[in-house]
Amino acid sequence: MKRRHYIFTKRRNSDLAVMATLLGLISNGSLAAVLYLAYKKGGAVPVSYGLTGLLAAFFSAAGLIMAVLAIQEKDVFKLFPVLGILLNLLALGILAFVVQLGF
């Protein structure tokens, strides 16, 4: 028996918003891993940890731009754009805090 699903809305999930959310998750995950490993080594870390932080900053900036563009689209669900904005702002905030601690 085939079930019929009725959709009463034309809204959809934006591809930009889903990508922005994924970039935010990747950024936060890599930052968490790098900060944990740096803590375990007592602060004496290789340059690759810094490059990972820089790459996370680029991912977060790109994800934030994508999320802002996605939230302005019409007829899209707002969960993924808002989640993308929050995750990417969190990653950028963590990076700003870590850089501030360095000075």
Image: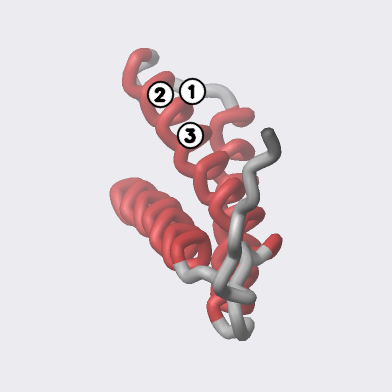
Q: How many labels, in total?
A: 3
Q: In the picture shown, does residue 94 fall above or below 72? A: above
Nearer the N terminus, badge 3 or badge 1? Answer: 3
Instruction: Look at mark 2 in the image and give the residue it sits on.
Output: 38
Q: Quadrant of residue 86?
A: bottom left
In which quarter of the view is residue 6 placed? bottom right
Is residue 58 left or right of 40 when viewed as pictured? right
Q: Position of residue 73 (x, y in %)?
A: 63, 82
Residue kind at label 1, given as amino acid type:
Val
Q: Which residue is drawn at the image coordinates 55% and 66% (left, top)?
A: 64
Question: Disc 1 marks which residue?
Answer: 45
Residue flagged by tag 2: what amino acid is it?
Ala
Q: Is residue 26 above or below residue 10?
A: above
Please identify, in this view, whether the residue under mark 3 or under mark 2 is nearer the observer: 3
User: 1 or 55, which is in the foreground?
Assistant: 1
Nearer to us in this view, 26 or 47: 26
Q: Are marks 1 and 2 in contact (CB under 8 Å)?
A: yes
- The residue that mark 3 highlights is 29
Whether residue 103 is visible to the viewer of this picture, yes or no, is: no
Residue shown at 42% from the left, 19% from the top: 37
- Element type where label 1 sits in the image: loop
